[in-house]
Amino acid sequence: MKKQSILNTASLKEQVYDYLREEIRKRKIEPGTAINMDATSRKLGISKTPLRDALIQLEMEGFVTIEPRKGIYVNGLALPEIREYYQVIGALESAALTACFNRLKPNYLNKMKKYVQDMHASLEKNNFASFHKKNLDFHNVYIDLSGNHWLKQIVTNLKKRLYDFFPQDRWIKEWELSSMKEHERIVEAIEQDDLPAACFTIKDVHWSYEVQEKFINAYYSNSK
């Protein structure tokens, strides 16, 4: 009798993708580990097609490396790679803000202020999952308003790597407190109609590897 899949057959590729990403995030599959296609498809009770498609997406996002005729390996996250991510995200987010700055009406700014307040509340409750979501929501206000689909896709994929590499309970509260002050400075610059100041805070402070280096080294100290 054919083994029944433990997954919902609807959107199977997406479910396999979510399953593997969660396994990687929780370190149930460690960096450097080979993913066995046969064993994984048997475990999930699925064919190799949705598994292969999910792995291709994970490779595009940097989570795994597929080496033809050799194997599929889970990637670590090295500091030089993180430095490049910060440089790209900073440049793209400042470009997104520039593109939509004249359309940042009070209702959008009020959303950003509310997300900062929510982040404060999440910190007080030591709720990283909530803080993380509100942090993404804050930045997505101007990223979405820019209307650039590819910009958002690239930034989203890079943030997945940065934020999903460790379990969500691994965080540095001092870093998040510093981050919130930077969010407040971004809002203040927008309120003052000061685009250069807002872009500087995004690109040369918030997403500056050099500015954030002590926190980055502490957070990713165990990455391989």
Image (tube, rainbow, N blue to C red):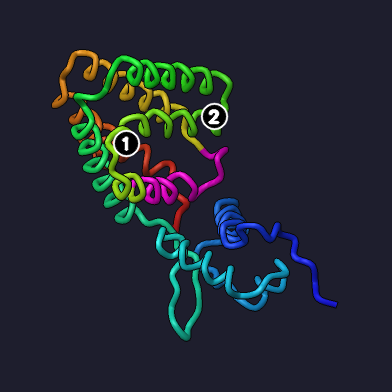
Which residue does the numbered mark 1 point to in the structure image?
143
Q: Which residue is mark 2?
A: 130
Residue at image coords 65%, 74%: 47
Q: Position of residue 87 (x, y in %)?
A: 24, 46
Near-viewer residue (92 or 13): 13
Within 10 angstroms of label 2, few (less than 14), some, or many (20 or more) residues? some
Q: Quadrant of residue 97?
A: top left
Residue 108, quarter of the rendered image = top left
Q: Is residue 77 magenta?
A: no
Magenta highlight range: 155-170
The total number of labels drawn is: 2
Q: Look at 56% across and 45% down and name the residue there.
A: 167
Q: Amino acid at mark 1?
A: Ile
Q: Nearer the viewer, residue 150 or 31?
A: 150
Q: Looking at the image, can residue 29 be seen?
A: no
Instruction: Specify the principal SS of the magenta part.
Output: helix
Is residue 188 at least partly visible in the picture? yes
Q: Where residue 224 sits in the image (x, y, percent)?
A: 44, 59
